[in-house]
Amino acid sequence: MHEMSLAEGVLQLVEATARRENARRVKTVVLEIGRLSSVEPEALAFCFEAVTHGSLAQGAALEIVAVPGQGWCLPCGATVAMAALWGACPRCGSHQVQPTGGTEMRVKEIEIE
Ligand SMILES: [Zn+2]
């Protein structure tokens, strides 16, 4: 389960920010998860709760924003919506689609107090 190491990475970033700002605790963490990033939002939320235990981010609300997948279809020469990594182009059915968006996970916002 690679979500555990991702959750640890998120926590490191969140804690570094919280310390820099002299925060007492972290209230909310907003994460953007691309639909093509192969990150399971539910698994990540579960891991986040586990790794934040005993940290400044314990009890922080985790908000997950799903970012739609996007790709560039070679035969169409167009940017198309992608439902899955290595999915077919919705216009021509080709699998020669290069993912261009929604492939990453990133911390969008951290709310502290
Ligand atoms: Zn196409």
Image (spheres, grey):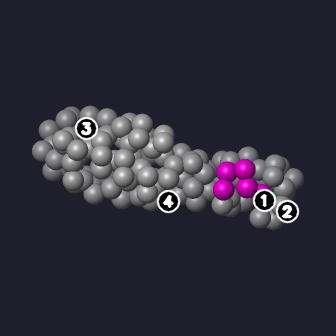
Q: In which quarter of the image is residue 83?
A: bottom right
Q: Where is residue 25 in the image (x, y as percent from the top left)?
A: 16, 47
Residue 112 lies, with reference to residue 63, above or below; the image says above
Q: Which mark is residue 89?
A: 1
SS category of the residue bearing label 4: strand
Does residue 71 appear anywhere in the picture?
A: yes
Which residue bears the numbered disc 2?
92
Sequence-earlier tag: 3 or 2: 3
Name which residue type carries label 3.
Glu
Ligand 1 - quadrant of the structure image:
bottom right
> What number is the disc on residue 15?
3
Residue at x-position 72% and y-position 50%: 86
Q: Marks 1 and 2, how far apart in space?
A: 6 Å
Q: Would the CB of label 2 be found within 8 Å of ligand 1?
A: yes
Residue 91: x %, y % from top left: 81, 65
- Dot 4 or dot 2, earlier in sequence: 4
